[in-house]
Image (spheres, rainbow, N blue to C red):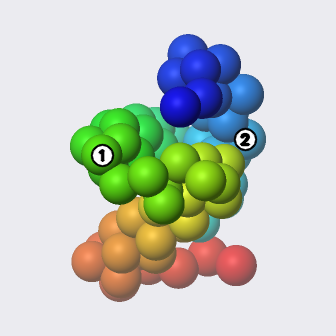
Amino acid sequence: MPDIDLLFKCYYRPLCLYAIHYLQDVDTAEDVVQDSFVRLLERKGDDRQWDNVKATYIRLCSTHVWTTCAGRNTLTA
């Protein structure tokens, strides 16, 4: 299992910037990235998720961003 603190520190800012780009709201973007991290931790029992934890975290965050955009009917490209 990877170092959780390091994972969060490495990817939090870039994923927030990604989320802000599409959501146009800093608070919502930070919530999405943090929620995605929690979802990743909840999946720690699934060994397949830890084979490529970086890709899993990015995919979870991206999916959560798009779901949030769809729920708000907003999408900025």
Give the residue at mark 1. Answer: 45
**Quarter of the picture holding the C terminus:** bottom right
Mark 1, mark 2: which one is toward the viewer?
A: 1
In the rendered structure, the answer to whether residue 2 lies left or right of residue 30 reads right
Question: Could you say which is closer to the camera, residue 37 or residue 13?
Answer: 37
Question: Could you say which is closer to the camera, residue 62 or residue 55?
Answer: 55
Residue 52 position within the rendered picture, expressed as x and y whole percent measured from the top left: 65, 54
In the rendered structure, the answer to whether residue 37 lies left or right of residue 39 reads right
* Between discs 1 and 2, the one toward the N terminus: 2
Relative vertical location of residue 27 with respect to residue 18 in this rendering, above or below = above
Residue 75 position within the rendered picture, expressed as x and y whole percent measured from the top left: 53, 79
What residue appears at the point 30 percent right and 46 percent down from the top-left corner? Answer: 45
Residue 65 position within the rendered picture, expressed as x and y whole percent measured from the top left: 46, 65
Give the residue at mark 2. Answer: 14
What residue appears at the point 53 percent right and 31 percent down from the top-left corner? Answer: 1
Three-letter residue code for mark 1: Gly
